[in-house]
Amino acid sequence: IRGFSWSLDGRFVAFWNNDEWYGTENKNSMHIYDVQTGALKKLSVKATQPGDPELSPNGDRVAFANETYNPDTEGLYLINADGTGYQQMTDIEAHNYYPVYSPLGGSIVYSSNQDGGVFDLFLFVFEGARLIRLTEGIGNVVSPSFSPDGTTILFANRAAEGPTSLWTIENTGENSQLLY
């Protein structure tokens, strides 16, 4: 088992595993576990190396990164918890990690190195399928987390030199602030 996430209400857990890897045949799968009933649902995904699953706040969708070096399959993906609606959110040739839903579920923030260099934060807004770059050139930006009201994003900046620092930025990309 690698990568897992709880729904906000604590009822569902999403995770992926690769126990079904046989030679050159890749059979990674995403799983949804219902904590109340004990039911386990297997979701077949086409991603060669799915990771960082993130359940939507109500547990009806899973966002995940395909952590591979294949530009044909790299990106962020969504799948409904019932196994339908599999779709690629981003098709940018980049390493995309740490997708996190906003508390209301209208957007996802994630780290990406789409310029081939350091990681920056991007916000994918479902309404209108808009992609907003939140940071640029401040370092390796990783591990985003939304504030409870969804207006601010907390993230780590792994600088090439010196210690990792903690920052915030508004979900509009305005007012980045070094905290620690």
Image (cartoon, grey):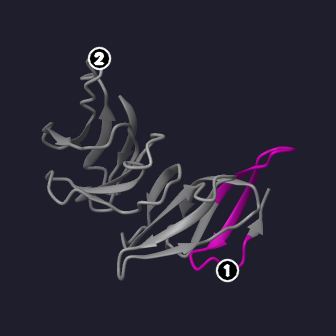
Neighbourhood count class around disc 2 (C-alpha, 10 Å): few under 14, some 14–19, many 20 upward: few
Q: Earlier in the sequence, mark 2 or mark 1?
A: 2
Residue lying farthest to the top in this orientation: 23
* Image coords of residue 123 (percent x, y): 51, 69
* Image coords of residue 83 (percent x, y): 15, 51
Q: Amino acid at mark 2?
A: Gly
Q: Quadrant of the N terminus?
A: top left
Neighbourhood count class around disc 1 (C-alpha, 10 Å): few under 14, some 14–19, many 20 upward: few
* Image coords of residue 169 (percent x, y): 66, 71
Against 95, residue 38 (above or below) is: above
Report if residue 68 lies within the magenta region.
no
Against 140, residue 58 (above or below) is: below
Q: Amino acid at mark 1?
A: Glu
Q: Does the image show residue 54? A: yes
- Left or right relative to 49: residue 61: left
Examine the image and state in which quarter residue 176 appears.
bottom right
Q: Which residue is mark 1?
A: 174
- Left or right relative to 169: residue 94: left
- Left or right relative to 147: residue 78: left
Q: Which residues are magenta?
A: 155-176
Examine the image and state in which quarter residue 136 appears.
bottom right
- Left or right relative to 101: residue 162: right
Against 104, residue 40 (above or below) is: above
**Front-most of residues 157 and 180:** 157
What distance separates the C-alpha of mark 2 from that of mark 1?
48 Å
Q: Secondary structure at mark 2?
A: loop
Q: Which mark is residue 23?
A: 2
Q: Does the image show residue 147? A: no
